Amino acid sequence: MGILERKEKQREEIRKMILEASMQLFVKEGFENVSIRKIADLIEYSPTTLYIYFKDKNEILFHLCEMGFERMIASNLALVQIENPIDRLYVLGENYINFGLENPEYYDLMFIQNAPMKTIREQNVGHWPNGDVALETLKHIIQECMDKKLIQTGDVATISMAVWAVAHGLVSLAIRQRLERLVEPDKVVKSMHESISWMINTLKKA
Amino acid sequence: MGILERKEKQREEIRKMILEASMQLFVKEGFENVSIRKIADLIEYSPTTLYIYFKDKNEILFHLCEMGFERMIASNLALVQIENPIDRLYVLGENYINFGLENPEYYDLMFIQNAPMKTIREQNVGHWPNGDVALETLKHIIQECMDKKLIQTGDVATISMAVWAVAHGLVSLAIRQRLERLVEPDKVVKSMHESISWMINTLKKA
DNA sequence: TTCGATTTATTAACACTGTTCATTATATTT
DNA sequence: AAATATAATGAACAGTGTTAATAAATCGAA
């Protein structure tokens, strides 16, 4: 069965080519400029060929989204060295904001666009590999904070939700140019960090 | 100069027709199904005619967005009867969540999509009539809470930002199907309300 | 009222988009 | 070598926003 294996490998390599070309377009020209035809041009295949390797564009975007999560997860690797879970939560929040502001295109795909979730619902039987990992990190830290009586106890999922909501609210309003309606544009980033600090502090006191 | 006046009125009427047709499509078929050609079909004009009355599609979407804010503002009219500003803040938050969950399409346009902001930057000399009104309401309540020493004092804009971030974070993650990754789908709405309560309560205690 | 100018509306077209189908080319198996 | 399975493609469908050139209607002045 070495032939089937090699075939499978070839198939996987072309899938990789397609995803890498997509990512290249994505980071260079932004989300809206990723089109099937442009990807095909870049790898010098016909547009229809992409449909042999991916069901549709949403599936490609889903994989780009997963790559975004890989980046985000990588940026949080150093967290394990922080023993105090509240400090860890704080850095997680800071990292989240920085990631969003530095990679707005990825952030968009990971937390705003519908496309990737469509693929999850239609194909992956509801599995969101990297996304779920990232959320587990958050829940785990909150749980540890609660175990060590550092924050008020309660439903982990609900508290995680509130924390995530603050961070996501800030980033998504920022990258969609809504925050500068409330704060002077050059003070937006500073205020965002202050908001995160405020939230973590109120969590502590409670 | 009665003729010019009448001409202006006719012009305004056709603009209204276009916007009403857009809104009809918008609420019936959703954001993605609003196209210049469909609007034109509905009012029985040619697609190019719309460009005589609006600069581009973004400008039409901007007006739909403003209509969304009118709805939201209307849903907050009863707020003036609540004398305690913290109670008012709480109801504002509840209304915000309910509005977002009940009008996801409008919410999208008002707080997520880029299109309306493009028009604001390019044309309206940076003026966002109804959007700014809605944000003023929030800031005003926060200011009143601070004046009456009901919450910790600080920069009004920054605190408003944190409060807005929680509410927007919850709604936008919910309508983009991200929250059900953290909480069981049938418990999402309940948890959202709990998160809002939690935030207002921690504001109080501080 | 007729002529010229201005405004309004339309047709045709451009340059795209995602996606599908029928056909060709390639590779594998019998 | 012939038959079969796989991979790749060209052409086309049905749509998108937008623009330029053209036709129709309206208006102000002679």
Image (spheres, coloured by chain):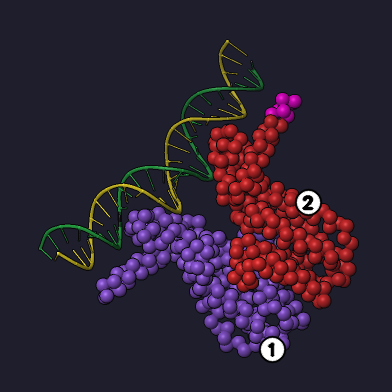
Chain colours: A red, B purple, C green, D yellow
Q: Which residue is labeled 1 in the image?
A: B148
Q: Are marks 1 and 2 in contact (CB under 8 Å)?
A: no
Quadrant housing residue B145: bottom right
Amino acid type at circle 1 is Lys
Q: How far is disc 1 from disc 2 in space, using C-alphas?
A: 46 Å
The reply to whether residue A5 is in sight is yes
The numbered disc on residue A74 is: 2
A129 shown above or below D27: above
- The residue at the point 87 percent across, 60 percent down is A82
* Nearer-the-camera pick, A107 or A153: A107
The numbered disc on residue B57 is: none
Total numbered labels placed on residues in the image: 2
Residue A146: % across, % down: 84, 68
Q: Chain of mark 2?
A: A
> Left or right: where does residue A136 sit relative to residue A58?
right
The reply to whether residue B171 is in sight is no
Q: Quadrant of the N terminus of chain A?
A: top right
Residue A6 among those drawn in magenta: yes
Quadrant housing residue D12: top left
Q: Quadrant of the C terminus of chain A?
A: bottom right
